[in-house]
Image (spheres, rainbow, N blue to C red):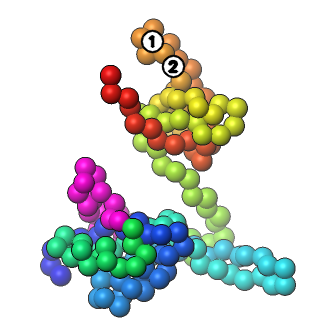
Amino acid sequence: MPDARWFACYTRARAEKQVEKMFEDRGIESFLPVVVRERQWKDRRKMVAFPLFPSYVFGRFSLPDTHVVLSIPGVSTIVRIRGQPVPIPDEDIANVRKFALALASTDVVIESVPYFAEGERVEVIDGPFAGVQGYVVERLTRRRVLIGIEPIGQAFEVDFDARLLRTIERSRS
């Protein structure tokens, strides 16, 4: 497909491997980066492959084929911005492939955390600061949240685990 681009497809929980197989069955190029981890059961230990990005499978297809992709069981949606599917640059997919290969050849343990852009408005969802809202700032490569009162120009910064934050929409005033 000459006009095919990479897109991120959001899947049902734990349906990534099935979706990848169905993409393959329908002739759609797919990419599911995985990380292998040891899992312990009562009676045994086993190495298990987990998606690097839970609930996401990357597919390479053209925009007219979106209806085919969305009809695949397990695919919830294609990641969009302002209602339009967002293509992912080939370089980004190549970079993730390199990263996944490097992970497979090392003992590095990674932890997936939500990504927040600098300036994004967030709310703390758990702990003693639950309900507090602020903006993500970055200082010396650390992610921090700026809590402040805009009209008086006063604020303070606090380090938060990204897993305790969620993006919120700005209220329209």
Give me the disc on residue 153: 1
Report if residue 96 lies within the magenta region: no
Q: Disc 1 to disc 2, how far (Cα)?
A: 8 Å
Residue 48, placed above or below residue 56: below
Residue 76 can be seen in this image? yes
Amino acid type at image mark 1: Gly
Kindly give the residue lying farthest to the bottom in the view shown: 25
Q: Do the CB atoms of the residues marked 1 and 2 lie less than 8 Å apart?
A: yes
Tell me which segment is drawn in magenta. Answer: 77-95
Where, by quadrant of the figure, is residue 21 drawn?
bottom left
Magenta stretch containing residue 91, yes or no? yes
Residue 153 in picture, x, y percent from top left: 45, 12
Label 2 belongs to which residue?
148
In the depicted structure, whether residue 64 falls above or below residue 45: above
Mark 2: which amino acid?
Gly
Q: Position of residue 22 (x, y in %)?
A: 39, 85
Please give the name of the residue rendered at 53% of the width and 35% of the height, measured from the top-left corner: 123
Other-residue count near label 2 (Cα within 10 Å), few / some / many at <14 / 14–19 / ≥20:
some
